[in-house]
Image (spheres, rainbow, N blue to C red):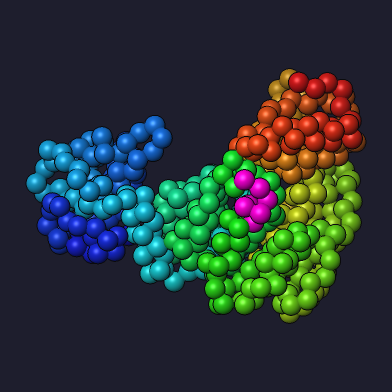
């Protein structure tokens, strides 16, 4: 991204406090340790660090300008550009919004209480069968990560796949405003981050902000098995595509992608879950999907990937090939043997009541096929606020349904 100091100030609503308005700038960073020549350094204020303390260091490292809060003062080189704004984080989003608007690409944005990252990975694998795709790295899914992902989009990219996360009201609305998605995917609404959202209604209000960001010209892709998402879809004026495992019909959807039964078997020493997908509506047909990992939640995420792939014109055979290639990442359903002869199912990244139950169901399924003891090592669920005691009590009751030998 190339921009001059005057244009930068205009885009983010700032004031040039220092520097030549025609100063040429290229690229953005928020980390003074990772500076490339000509970059704009955004001095963000976080819980542990204040980026304003590192503006001088950024200048010495090769940054050409900085965006700082109003009233900031420091002994900086005279040639160094400085733009003052009331809120540097908001300004970062404004520049990303401007950059995204200039890009002639499709944007797929994914949110939901469970399965965001896995769905993002599956969608990315699928779309790469036809397009040059840029995706959010790791957990670049917040008010800093999403703008940095947008700035990093290469010139030849045709599609970008973003993950939008939130733990307090208003974040999804802002992320949707910044990313301006063409396709919005919501995986499921579940009790997560209740410290910020209070209850399930609060979670719904936050997630549905993605739909408001789509507008009439967008495509809403939603889980048919979630009644709240179905209700949101009923009031959406744009195009609607539903997906779901054992999901009901939905009137008004242009296309639905559904599956009913899952079969698990051993194929060449790999555990595979297989399910028949029925595509109805504008693009109809059936397909047999194979995933090389177990868990109904993974099947549900795969259906979302099928929906996005079909919407963007990818032939079914290539979608199936992409899903066969999928392997969960560490912390998010990764299943593999270690050097000591143990098999480990790693779901350690994060948890809420629904995702915890999904993980335990997957553990129970693996136990049917993998010999030896079943050992559970569980951690607490955080950010549930006043709902935490009840949520953990209910999880304890759910554990009575799970076959295990030891519990830590």
For the view shown, which residue lies furthest in the left direction? Answer: 78
Q: Please give the name of the residue rendered at 32% of the width and 36% of the height, measured from the top-left corner.
A: 50
The front one of 379 and 257 is 379
From the top left corner, tell me how far across and down residue 202 is, in percent. Answer: 62, 52
From the top left corner, tell me how far across and down residue 300 is, in percent. Answer: 76, 55
Residue 77 relative to residue 64: left or right: left
Question: The N terminus lies in which quarter of the figure?
Answer: bottom left
**Magenta segment, which residues?**
198-204
Q: Is residue 201 magenta?
A: yes
Q: Main secondary structure of the magenta part?
A: helix
Picture quadrant where residue 303 is located: bottom right
Number of numbered labels in the structure image? 0
Question: The C terminus lies in which quarter of the figure?
Answer: top right
Q: Is residue 217 magenta?
A: no
The front one of 136 and 267 is 136
The vertical placement of 334 against 89, above or below, is above
The front one of 1 and 97 is 97
The vertical placement of 194 against 319, above or below, is above
Q: Please give the name of the residue rendered at 77% of the width and 43% of the height, measured from the top-left corner.
A: 358
For the view shown, which residue lies furthest in the bottom direction? Answer: 282
The front one of 184 and 281 is 184
From the top left corner, tell me how far across and down residue 160 is, in percent. Answer: 51, 61
Q: Is residue 199 visible?
A: yes
Q: Please give the name of the residue rendered at 30% of the width and 43% of the height, measured from the top-left corner.
A: 43
């Amino acid at each position: 991204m190339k921009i001059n100091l005057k244009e930068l100030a205009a885009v983010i609503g700032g004031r040039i406090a220092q520097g030549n308005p025609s100063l040429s700038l290229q690229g953005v960073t928020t980390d003074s340790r990772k500076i490339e020549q000509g970059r704009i350094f955004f001095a963000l204020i976080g819980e542990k660090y204040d980026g304003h303390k590192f503006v001088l260091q950024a200048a010495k490292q090769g940054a050409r300008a900085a965006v700082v809060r109003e009233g900031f003062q420091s002994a900086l080189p005279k040639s160094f550009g400085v733009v003052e704004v009331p809120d540097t984080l908001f300004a970062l989003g404004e520049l990303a919004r401007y950059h995204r608007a200039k890009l002639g690409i499709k944007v797929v944005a994914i949110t939901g209480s469970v399965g965001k990252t896995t769905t993002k990975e599956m969608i990315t694998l699928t779309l790469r069968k036809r397009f040059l795709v840029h995706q959010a790295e790791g957990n670049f899914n917040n008010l800093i990560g999403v703008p940095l992902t947008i700035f990093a989009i290469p010139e030849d990219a045709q599609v970008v796949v973003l993950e939008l996360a939130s733990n307090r009201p208003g974040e999804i609305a802002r992320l949707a405003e910044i990313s301006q998605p063409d396709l919005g995917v919501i995986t499921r609404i579940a009790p997560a981050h209740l410290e910020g959202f209070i209850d399930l209604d609060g979670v719904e209000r936050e997630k549905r902000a993605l739909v408001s960001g789509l507008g009439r010209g967008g495509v809403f892709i939603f889980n048919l098995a979630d009644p709240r998402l179905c209700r949101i879809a009923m009031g959406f004026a744009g195009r609607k595509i539903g997906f779901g495992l054992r999901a009901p019909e939905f009137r008004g959807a242009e296309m639905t992608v559904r599956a009913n039964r899952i079969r698990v078997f051993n194929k060449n020493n790999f555990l595979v879950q297989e399910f028949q997908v029925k595509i109805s509506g504008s693009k109809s047909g059936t397909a047999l999907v194979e995933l090389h990992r177990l868990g109904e939640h993974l099947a549900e995420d795969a259906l979302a990937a099928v929906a996005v792939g079909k919407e963007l014109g990818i032939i079914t055979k290539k979608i199936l090939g992409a899903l066969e290639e999928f392997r969960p990442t560490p912390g998010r359903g990764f299943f593999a043997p270690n050097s000591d002869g143990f098999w480990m199912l790693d779901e350690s990244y994060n948890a809420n009541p629904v995702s915890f139950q999904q993980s335990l169901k997957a553990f129970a399924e693996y136990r049917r096929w993998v010999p030896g003891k079943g050992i559970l090592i569980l951690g607490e669920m955080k950010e549930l606020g006043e709902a935490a005691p009840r949520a953990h009590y209910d999880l304890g009751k759910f554990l009575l349904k799970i076959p295990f030998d030891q519990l830590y």
